[in-house]
Structure formats: C-alpha cells, structure tokens
Image (tube, rainbow, N blue to C red):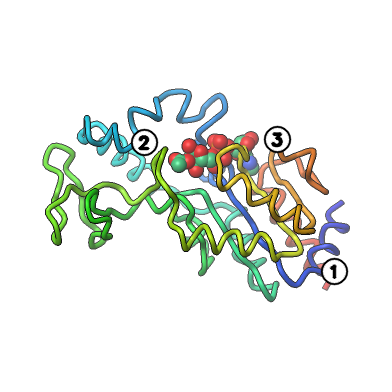
Amino acid sequence: MYEEIAKVVRNCGKIAVLTGAGISAESGVPTFRGKEGLWGKFRPEELATMDAFMANPEIVWEWYNWRRQLIGEVQPNPGHYALAELASEIDDFSLITQNVDGLHRAAGSREVLELHGNIMFNKCVKCNRRAPEDIDIDPSNIPACEHCGGSLRPDVVWFGEMLDREVISEAFRAAETCELFFSVGTSAIVHPAASLPISAKQAGATLIEVNPERTPLSDLADYYLAGPSGEVLPQILEALREHS
Ligand code: OAD
C-alpha cells in the first residue's frame, strides 16, 4: 500500500494537505471531539464565541491561558516533521491547518495556512489589529489595545466568526488546483475547512485520508489509511525516499 501511495505522490507536482487536531494528538494536545475531546468536557458556546467573551472575558481568558500553557509545553511529533520534509520533496506543496497550536511551524514547515488563527497571538476585540507578541494576559486585568483601547482576545477564530478572507481563498485555490489532497487527523465536519477535500476531489484530485477513525470523508477518499498520523506519514515519506 505505501509503495503504491509513494508512486502517486511521486507522480504529483502539486499537493495540498489539510490537518486537524488529530495530527497534534500524539504531541499531547487534546482533540475537540471523541472520548477525551475538549468539547466533551467544556461547552464551546461558553468559551469559544464572541458572546462568551463579552459576557465573561475572565473565564474565556483562563481557558485560553490553560491551553496556551499546555501547548507551550509540547513538541511536534513525527507526523508534523514528516509533512515538513515532504514539502521539501515536492515542487508545489500547500499546508493548510485548522490547528491553532503552531506545531507545524515548530517542526520546520515554513508556509502554513492557519485557517483558525494561532493561539499564541492576541488581537483587539474592537479594531482586530494583532497585538505585539509575548504579552502575558492576566484574566482579571485584561490589557487594552494600544491603538483603540479595546480588550485583547486570543487571535483565533471563534464559532460564528468568518475566517480570514485571504487565508481561506488561498486554501481553496490550493485545494482546487492540486493533483493530490491529504486530509489528516480531522473529523472533517467543521466548514468551511471540511469543504476543502471535497472541492479538491470534485476538481479531479486524488484524495488520501489519514485517520484512525472513519469520517464522513472516508467513503469519498481514494485511499483511507487507518492509523495515527505520527506513524502513517513517516511511512509514506520512507516509501517515497525508497522509490526515488
Ligand atoms: P476533531 O477533534 O473534531 O477531530 C480530530 C480527529 O483526529 C478525529 O477524526 C480523530 O479520529 C482523529 N485523530 C485522533 N488521533 C489521531 C492521530 N493520532 N492521528 C490522526 N488522527 C487522529 O478536530 P478537528 O477536525 O481539527 O475549531 O476539528 C475542527 C475544528 O473544530 C477545530 O479547528 C476547532 C473545533 O471546534 C474552532 O475552534 C473554530
């Protein structure tokens, strides 16, 4: 199977990859859905919406500080590294992620389309400007934007919010023009990200899914690779190198 996939990869000049929380699971970052998922323990509408932030910014910031601390302590895993290395083997490679943990960059991926933002950055709730890095947020005394005085919030996309127009357009362009699309570690149910593999397939790309569990995408995929991405992706890379 890996030999066959290596051949498909080798014959493609243009590859796009979409990752979700599952690729960071082996680093120790909890996913959102599933038995141990964050949304089984916390209510998204109380923590990840503008209404929640307006009603109770302190609680929202406490939750994001907890996640920041957790993410600050973890390292990329072999799945992140395999994608960074794959990029160097392919002429045209786009990496799109729903993750806000920054682990793809930490693994050496240079260009990453972060659809849902990055948890380590802050932005203004009013004027939307990104705040300087490295501001520690005290939830009981939230700093104000230096431009307009609005409260600072994490630079992530909350439920009900639009994605950055340029970032999502670039992601669709990559999906619709690639020859091979990988969907890795995502439950493939949150749109618009979940539309990317479907658009790629409709435009004629081969679709490969990597996930230990089946998803709504599995039946559409040309190859469904059941397993953790930290094992499956390095095996693809290894097969690719053996074949070149
Ligand atoms: P989910 O938590 O919905 O799904 C994680 C997926 O990863 C599941 O399909 C798991 O089977 C799979 N998985 C678990 N361990 C894995 C491993 N070791 N290797 C590969 N796959 C594994 O996470 P997302 O699909 O990323 O949005 O969720 C999408 C969005 O929903 C998130 O970006 C977030 C959330 O609400 C916002 O916060 C806006």
Q: Quadrant of residue 88?
A: bottom right
Say which residue label 3 marks: 216
Ligand 1 under 8 Å from disc 3 Cβ:
no
- Of the numbered discs 2 and 1, the one sitting upstream in the chain is 2
Residue 190: image location, x then y, percent: 55, 39
Report, in whole angstroms, how far the alpha carbon at label 2 lies from the one at label 1.
45 Å
Q: Looking at the figure, which quarter contains the C terminus?
A: bottom right
Q: Is residue 55 visible?
A: yes
Q: Residue 20 location, x and y as percent?
A: 56, 46
Which residue lies most toward the bottom here?
91
User: Is 161 drawn above or below residue 16 in the view shown?
Assistant: above
The answer to whether 173 appears left or right of 115 in the picture is right
Q: Nearer the viewer, residue 7 or 52?
A: 52
Q: Does residue 77 lie above or below 95 as drawn? A: above
The residue nearer to you, when weighing 204 against 90, is 204
Front position among marks 3 and 1:
3
Q: Dividing the image into four equal quarters, which quarter contains ligand 1?
A: top right
Based on the displayed image, in which of its 4 quarters is residue 15 positioned?
bottom right
Which residue position holds label 1? Answer: 243
Q: Secondary structure at mark 2?
A: loop
Residue type beneath disc 1: His
**Would you name the residue on which mark 2 appears?**
48
Say left or right for 212 vs 7.
Answer: left
Q: Is mark 2 within 8 Å of ligand 1?
A: yes
- The quarter of the picture where residue 243 lies is bottom right
Q: Relative to residue 130, is residue 229 depicted above or below?
A: above
Residue 138 image position (x, y, % from top left) = 16, 43
Q: Secondary structure at mark 3?
A: loop
> What is the three-letter code of the residue carrying label 2?
Ala
Residue neighbourhood size for the residue with mark 2, other residues' Cα within 10 Å, grouped as few (<14), some (14–19), many (≥20)? some
